[in-house]
Image: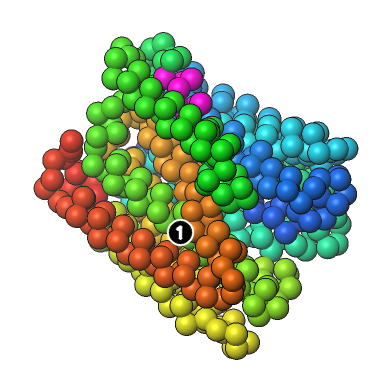
């Protein structure tokens, strides 16, 4: 008995160390999404990048990080998640060093693109290592809760630290921070992470990999550049058509493949379809709120970049606190109810931001509403991840988590082009911001209703909604 107790304690400690490493890597990638944003004007002046070229500092990362997620998630399933995770970390660190030492726009954008490729390997394999290490139940709820909290916190810390580092040490310090982070996490991951892959090794579906990766790359490129050029620009239209055509071809290829990259029965599962819809909306709409709120705080209220970062810092602190109890709440009420409730709360708090005006005291409304909305957003992140991955065999966890992370990346990419332009093209900024917030709140609220209906207990999967996995524990 004492021997069993000692073994269990050792196993629990090992799992905690694995979780620490995986969450550190997720935090690092989340940091990369936002740490450079406030440094873009300084970076452009230093490297000689034109104002119109600056969005490529973001797009160069977003393209590979979103386009290769599904492929790398499946490659990890087949050939080893740990191996691909470590490769991604090494590539991310080397790319961050290249971006730190960049001598012209081409070298910098190359570093950013390689960072994105490394992130595309880290995120789905890290998520699948987490879900295969922690079985369904309270342990996985807690693990995903911690991971989701650090994902949200990393984005917020990036916004605050990016401004401080740029002011004190220059823009290159933001990239150097990521290189050091990767250098610290890599040896820990190599020492602590177990290998994990499917028992069998079917052939990789190469036609499926090419069509889905090409489709995602085209779609993300079109949506990323639409904010600058507009959806009517010929390049955006052509790229959108190419992306849709490639993804349509992917569906045809997968329906005929012997060993498809994506299991079509999985995509027909209600938990996967409706869960990912909830994830897509919570990410796209929250990124839009942060974008227009940044415009409001700086251009309407006249706050500095650092002061704006502090407002979002409050959101990060509250999200960290919420991460300690949200998984327990989800365990009690079930992932389905938690997802619907979180989306409804995010929609209501976004609607509360319609009360913003030109009075300086509005900063308190902005801080309170966006912080509470951020807590609801965190609840949606955790519960939709649980919804999508529940009941999925270990051999397909990389694919399931690849879908989850692809949804996150696509959501973070499409929100600002779709709605953010309404604020920047309006004759008066504040009315434009209110229009965006009103549409945002309506979309999130409508999605809460649709997801609630789509995941009603007792519906069949194609899908059964697994009531045990999604219900209260």
Which residue is disc 1 drawn over?
Answer: 285
Residue 20 shows in this picture: no
State the residue at coordinates (53%, 55%).
416
Where is residue 422 drawn, in percent x and y?
Answer: 52, 62
**Looking at the image, which is closer to me, 139 or 421?**
421
The residue that appears at 38% across and 12% down in the rendered structure is 202
What segment carries the magenta color?
A: 208-215
Note whether 152 is above or below 104 in the view shown: below
Q: Is 456 above or below relative to 77?
A: below
Q: Main secondary structure of the magenta part?
A: helix
Residue at the image position 25 percent from the left and 28 percent from the top: 265
Foreground residue among 235 and 300? 235
Check residue 378 for magenta coloring: no
In this rendering, the count of numbered labels is 1
Quadrant (top left/top right/bottom left/bottom right) for the C terminus = bottom left
Q: Quadrant of the N terminus?
A: top left
């Amino acid at each position: 008995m004492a021997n069993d107790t000692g073994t269990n304690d050792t196993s629990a400690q090992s799992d905690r160390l694995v979780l620490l490493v995986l969450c550190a890597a997720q935090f690092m990638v989340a940091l990369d999404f936002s740490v450079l944003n406030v440094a873009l004007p300084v970076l452009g002046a230093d490297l000689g990048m034109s104002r119109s070229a600056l969005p490529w500092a973001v797009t160069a990362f977003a393209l590979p990080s979103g386009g290769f997620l599904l492929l790398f998630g499946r490659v990890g399933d087949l050939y080893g998640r740990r191996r691909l995770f470590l490769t991604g970390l090494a590539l991310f660190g080397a790319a961050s060093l290249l971006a730190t030492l960049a001598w012209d726009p081409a070298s910098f954008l190359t570093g950013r693109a390689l960072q994105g490729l490394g992130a595309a390997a880290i995120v789905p394999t890290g998520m699948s290592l987490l879900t295969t290490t922690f079985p369904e139940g309270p342990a996985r709820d807690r693990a995903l809760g911690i991971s989701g909290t650090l994902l949200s916190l990393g984005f917020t810390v990036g916004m605050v630290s990016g401004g401080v580092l740029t002011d004190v040490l220059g823009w290159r310090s933001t990239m150097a921070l990521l290189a050091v982070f990767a250098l610290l996490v890599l040896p820990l991951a190599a020492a602590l992470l177990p290998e994990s892959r499917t028992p069998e090794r079917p052939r990789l579906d190469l036609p499926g990999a090419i069509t889905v990766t090409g489709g995602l790359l085209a779609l993300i490129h079109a949506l990323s550049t639409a904010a600058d050029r507009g959806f009517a620009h010929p390049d955006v239209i052509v790229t959108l058509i190419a992306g849709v055509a490639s993804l349509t071809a992917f569906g045809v290829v997968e329906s005929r493949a012997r060993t498809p990259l994506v299991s079509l029965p999985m995509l027909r599962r209600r938990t996967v379809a409706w869960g990912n819809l909830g994830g897509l909306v919570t990410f796209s709409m929250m990124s839009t709120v942060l974008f227009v709120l940044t415009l409001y705080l700086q251009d309407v209220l006249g706050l500095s970049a650092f002061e704006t970062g502090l407002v979002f810092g409050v959101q990060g602190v509250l999200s960290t606190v919420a991460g300690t109890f949200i998984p327990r709440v989800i365990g009690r009420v079930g992932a389905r109810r938690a997802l619907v409730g979180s989306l409804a709360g995010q929609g209501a708090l976004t609607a509360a931001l319609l009360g913003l005006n030109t009075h300086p005291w509005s900063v308190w409304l902005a801080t309170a509403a966006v912080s509470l909305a951020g807590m609801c957003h965190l609840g949606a992140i955790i519960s939709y991840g649980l919804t999508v991955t529940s009941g999925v065999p270990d051999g397909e966890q990389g694919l399931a988590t690849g879908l989850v992370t692809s949804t996150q990346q696509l959501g973070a990419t499409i929100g600002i082009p779709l709605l953010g332009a309404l604020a920047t093209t309006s004759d008066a900024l504040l009315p434009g911001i209110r229009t965006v917030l009103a549409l945002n709140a309506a979309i999130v609220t409508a999605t809460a209703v649709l997801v609630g209906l789509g995941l009603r207990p007792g519906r069949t999967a194609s899908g059964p909604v697994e009531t045990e996995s999604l219900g209260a524990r």
